[in-house]
Image (cartoon, rainbow, N blue to C red):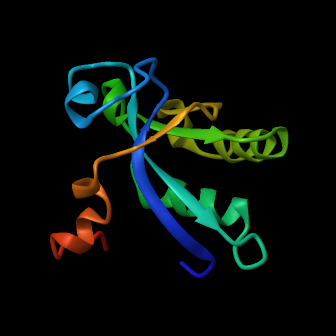
Amino acid sequence: MPGIIGTKVGYTGGKNPQPSYESVCGGDGHTEAIQIEYDPNQVSYEQLLDEFMTGHQPTPTKTQYKSAIWYHNEEQKKIVEAQLEASPAARFVDMDEAKDWHDAEEYHQKYYDKSNCSVM
């Protein structure tokens, strides 16, 4: 998507100060997530949310894999609320203020590229 500068996968939302893949799998309260760095002059927050909401089918699941949007300020919160109000899938998407972020292990970064997988 034009305007995406970079992505990282990691863990957020839990209380473990040093989560690992093993601790997250064990139920430490963290969710596996993606952090997106973007250029707002090229892509808007609304466009990113549109892509998120159309690019997956959220379903109820355990915390590790839940669908969630973590906002960073009140403006983002309002945009998320509006997006979720317009989506029938919203009942399966959590919305919360951004929590501490922990990068996942290096072998998880760019996993699809490393594995020659395609998401489309």
Residue 107 vertical position relative to residue 113 in the rendered view, above or below: above
Residue lying at the far left of the rendered structure: 115
Q: Which residue is located at x 25 percent, y 63 percent? A: 111
Q: Nearer the viewer, residue 92 or 104?
A: 104
At a point 60% along the width and 45% down the height, the residue shown is 87
Image position, residue 25 (x, y; %):
22, 28
Q: Position of residue 35 (x, y in %)?
A: 51, 53
Residue 96 picture quarter: top right
- Number of marks drawn: 0
Q: Is residue 22 above or below residue 2?
A: above
Q: Up-down: is 35 above or below 91?
A: below
Which quarter of the image is occupied by the C terminus?
bottom left
Q: Residue at x 32, y 19 (%)?
A: 28
Residue 117 coordinates in the image, percent (x, y): 19, 72
Given residues 63 and 83, the one toward you in this image is: 63
User: In the rendered view, does 78 fall on the left or right side of 86?
Assistant: right
Of residues 24 and 1, the one nearer the viewer is 24
The residue shown at (57%, 73%) is 4
Give the camera-side residue of 111 and 19.
19
**Left or right: 22 with respect to 60?**
left
Q: Residue furthest right?
A: 75
